[in-house]
């Protein structure tokens, strides 16, 4: 016979080899009572579980949806919440993680409330055995940890199981340092692009350190010819994103990576003069193709006025290197080369940080450690003269 507790606090009765307690926790959308059951070997143990639940429920510590899976929640979090605060390119990266590591994985179908550190640790360990790199695991854990952090915030879970996993160490590899042109390689590069159709895009990047998305987003009103500078305040991104469950190719002009990316950068005089010539040539193209030219003010535009594609620049850059026997580096290496030349000229770290648009001086120092170290070595070598007999 069930023993009813007073004041609607539930009931307790003998059940198999122990006790079962039942409490009403609310009503569903149809108005039906929702009951939750607790089991214990003894009556006291069962009552303690019931009281613990009620206390946590009063304090808002009880998960509000104990049936949702990681697969379901990750999609909800990404497209209903995260999408409101990050750029499309970031959503794309998180979506790739979902499709590759969550959607059809061994953890995707697990309910959030059942996820724990052991499950996650085993999953990561198995991925390593399958040949995934420590960097991949770090990126994956960061994404899942972020989505579970929000699940905890809205009481879907009580703990974030990603907080306690031990990630594999990322081994240091000397070749991972940033790739740049040496002074000799830069001179050689400048020679072979003398008559190249994208010469100005290349040298402007070498002379200002713009990211490729910032470069193709440049408009003429961003350039101050009087003071010899340009203002970075936007970036163009193209790629696939998932919208309403469908993958679509999108083009977005957005604010730069961070607020610190909005900046003014001086333009070398030689490049400034080339920009003036380029504008005159562009005016001729506008006049020639006036019926189809839609002038949006882009500095680097095609014959119909659209901005040039970042992919086009990257492929063109790589082809130049290959055709002329120059070592292979990425287009982004032009930005790294710009920063390196500044360090070599004695420009202070803080100034380089501002010119590059990094959010912190630590980021700049971390990326260009190899340059800083070489500068230290050079400085110490200058002391040799003091000790010569």
Image: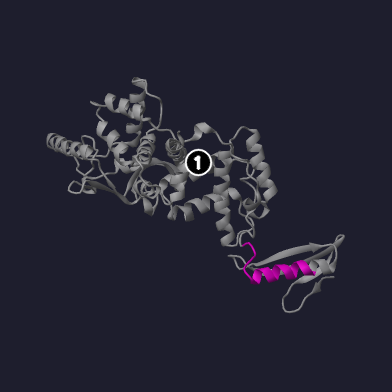
Q: Main secondary structure of the magenta part?
A: helix
Q: Name the foreground residue: 222 vs 372.
A: 372
Q: Is residue 242 magenta?
A: no
Which residue lies at the image location 37% right of the left edge and 20% below the top edge? 325
Q: Residue at x 24, y 38 (%)?
A: 300
Identify the residue at image location x=37%, y=54%.
259
In the image, residue 134 lies at what x, y percent? 59, 38
Q: Indicate yes or no whether the magenta region holds residue 48.
A: yes
Residue 379 position, x and y percent, is 43, 39
Write down the region rendered in magenta: 47-63
Viewer-proximal residue among 157 and 365? 365
Residue 125 visible within the image:
yes
Horizontal and vertical percent for residue 270? 21, 37
Give the vertical position of 126 relative to 364 (above or below). above
Q: Nearer the viewer, residue 43 or 257?
A: 257
Res. 90 in view: no
Please give the residue where the numbered disc 1 appears in the rendered image: 96
Colour scheme of this structure image? one colour
């Amino acid at each position: 016979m069930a023993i009813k507790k007073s004041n609607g606090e539930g009931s307790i009765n003998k059940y198999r080899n122990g006790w079962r307690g039942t409490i009403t926790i609310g009503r569903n959308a149809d108005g039906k009572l929702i009951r939750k059951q607790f089991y214990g070997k003894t009556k006291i143990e069962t009552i303690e579980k019931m009281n613990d639940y009620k206390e946590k429920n009063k304090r808002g510590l009880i998960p509000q949806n104990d049936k949702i899976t990681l697969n379901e929640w990750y999609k909800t979090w990404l497209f209903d919440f995260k999408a409101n605060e990050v750029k499309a390119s970031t959503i794309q990266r998180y979506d790739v993680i979902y499709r590759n590591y969550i959607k059809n994985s061994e953890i995707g179908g697990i309910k959030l409330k059942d996820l724990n550190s052991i499950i996650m640790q085993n999953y990561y360990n198995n991925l390593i055995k399958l040949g995934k790199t420590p960097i991949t695991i770090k990126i994956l854990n960061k994404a899942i940890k972020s989505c579970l952090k929000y699940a905890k915030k809205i009481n879907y879970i009580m703990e974030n199981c990603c907080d306690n996993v031990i990630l594999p160490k990322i081994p240091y590899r000397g070749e991972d340092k940033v790739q740049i042109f040496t002074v000799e390689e830069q001179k050689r590069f400048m020679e072979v692009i003398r008559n190249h159709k994208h010469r100005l895009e290349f040298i402007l990047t070498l002379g200002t350190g713009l990211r490729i998305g910032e470069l193709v987003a440049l408009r003429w009103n961003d350039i101050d010819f009087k003071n010899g500078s340009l203002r970075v305040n936007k970036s163009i991104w193209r790629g696939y994103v998932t919208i309403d469950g469908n993958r679509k190719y999108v083009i977005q002009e957005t604010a730069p990576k961070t607020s610190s990316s909005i900046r003014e950068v001086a333009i070398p005089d030689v490049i400034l003069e080339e920009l003036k010539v380029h504008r005159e040539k562009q005016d001729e193209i506008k006049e020639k193709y006036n019926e189809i030219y839609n002038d949006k003010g882009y500095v680097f535009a095609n014959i119909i006025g659209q901005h040039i594609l970042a992919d086009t620049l990257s492929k063109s850059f790589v082809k130049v290197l290959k055709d002329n026997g120059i070592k292979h580096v990425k287009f982004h290496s032009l930005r790294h080369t710009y920063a390196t030349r500044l360090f070599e000229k004695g420009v202070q770290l803080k100034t380089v940080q501002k010119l590059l648009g990094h959010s912190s001086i630590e980021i700049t120092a971390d990326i260009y450690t190899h340059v800083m170290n070489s500068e230290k070595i050079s400085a110490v070598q200058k002391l040799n003269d003091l000790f010569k007999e």
